[in-house]
Amino acid sequence: MLILRSLAFNVAFYANMILWMVAIAPALLMPRPVLWWLVRHWSRLNVWLLEHVAGTKVEVRGLDRLPPGGCIVASKHQSTFETLCLFDLFHEPAFILKRELMWIPLFGWFAARTGMIPVDRNKGREALRDMTRRALVEMQHGRSILIYPEGTRRPPGAEPAYKIGVAHLYRETGMSVVPVALNSGLFWPRRGFRRHPGTLVVEILPPIGPGLDMAGIMARLQADIEAASDRLLQEAVARDPSLPLGPDARDRLATLRSA
């Protein structure tokens, strides 16, 4: 049954993506609010498919913690899921993404039209300056800037690998950072065909206000996100002890139990 449900979801998910991109391509010529309305509904449909086809319920906690106006959202990144659900949680979020994604036909066009912020990782400090400049422009329009502090997907329980980009944004913009923890990789692995039933949790944590130095924000952000992600890992396994875990998750769970 798990194989069949996973197959059905994957087929429906990719078919839905292709059909929507083709169907709403004319919206690229329309005002941005129209395009965002369509993107949010595409995001909601993907979450509906995950819940009703794969059997993975999505629970979002802490929405009341979001500050008014723009902010920096620093999210754990374990799965493709984050690029679907988070569109609908924040006001027209501007994702920080690698430049190569902008080259994908249709997807890259939509990303450019909705004001996503590409980063050329080969440019070093120049890339940080470009990213910050673009982020400031988008924040002036009340948008949130969404960044994955580790830069790429990491399996549940893996050793943290936070990069300096989020601290640079925090210092240069003077904006609060909203940490986000989740356990999506347990249900939608970054590599793998199967989609596991259960309760996928996205938790918005208390904002971190401006004023910390770069070392301070890095330490605080990592501590907050990792502690919450550890808790969500333990919670998911307590709900379903048969949930399949990768080696990183098993090792981390063993460490937490022995502490």
Image (spheres, rainbow, N blue to C red):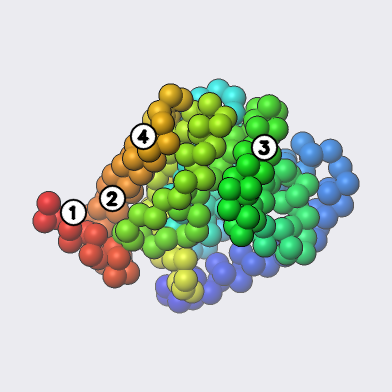
Q: Could you tell me residue 205's position as x and y percent?
A: 39, 35
Please report the residue visible at 78 percent of the width from the left and 47 percent of the height from the top: 113
| Residue type (three-letter) at the residue carrying disc 4 | Gly
Could you say which disc has been placed on residue 133 in the image?
3
Tag 2 and tag 1, C-beta contact below 8 Å? yes
Q: Nearer the viewer, mark 3 or mark 2?
A: 3
Q: Secondary structure at mark 1?
A: helix
Q: Viewed as shown, does residue 135 lie left or right of 258?
A: right
Q: Alpha-carbon distance for marks 1 and 4?
A: 25 Å
Kindly identify which numbered label has been placed on residue 256: 1
Sequence-first disc among 1 and 3: 3
- Badge 4 marks a residue whose secondary structure is helix
Q: Is residue 259 left or right of residue 170?
A: left
Q: Is residue 78 above or below residue 206?
A: below
Q: CA distance from mark 1 to mark 3?
A: 41 Å
Q: Measure the C-alpha gap from mark 3 to mark 2.
A: 34 Å
Q: Which residue is mark 2?
A: 230
Q: Is residue 16 visible?
A: no
